[in-house]
Amino acid sequence: MAITCPRCGAQFDVTLFQFGHGVRCQCGQWVELERGHVVDANPPNDGLPKESRRAGEPLDH
């Protein structure tokens, strides 16, 4: 999962973060996990109802 810089749109791997900590983007913006981590309101549609997916199962089969 990725966190997106609100200034330039660069993406960072969540595994780079500890909750409450962040990284400085190349554009100079400070990106924190607690503020930068947003669940996508429009996830990709894989054709399956949400109940059909198991947690951690990849969307692309």
Image (cartoon, helix red, strand yellow):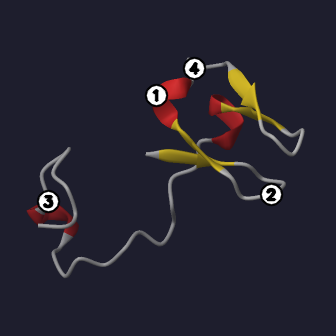
Q: Residue 56 in the image: x percent, y percent?
A: 20, 44
Please tell me which residue is depicted at 67% across the width and 41% down the height of the picture: 36
The three-letter amino acid code for the residue at tag 2 is Cys
Q: Is residue 26 left or right of residue 43?
A: right
Q: Which quadrant of the rendered structure holds the N terminus?
A: top left
Q: Nearer the viewer, residue 23 or 42?
A: 23
Q: Write down the quadrant of residue 52 in the picture.
A: bottom left
Tag 2 near tag 4, CB within 8 Å: no
Reading the image, the residue beneath label 2 is: 8
**Residue 15: assigned label:** 1
Q: CA distance from mark 2 to mark 1?
A: 20 Å
Q: CA distance from mark 3 to mark 4?
A: 26 Å
Say few, some or many: other residues with alpha carbon within 10 Å of mark 3 (under 14 / 14 to 19 / 20 or more): few
Q: Indicate the secondary structure of the residue bearing disc 4.
A: loop
The three-letter amino acid code for the residue at tag 3 is Arg
**Residue 31: assigned label:** none
Q: CA distance from mark 1 to mark 4?
A: 10 Å
* Nearer-N-terminus badge (3/1): 1
Residue with the most extreme front position? 26
Q: Residue 43 in the image: x percent, y percent?
A: 41, 69
Reading the image, the residue beneath label 3 is: 53
Reading the image, the residue beneath label 4 is: 19
Please tell me which residue is depicted at 72% across the width and 27% down the height of the picture: 23
* Nearer-N-terminus badge (2/1): 2
Q: CA distance from mark 3 to mark 1?
A: 23 Å
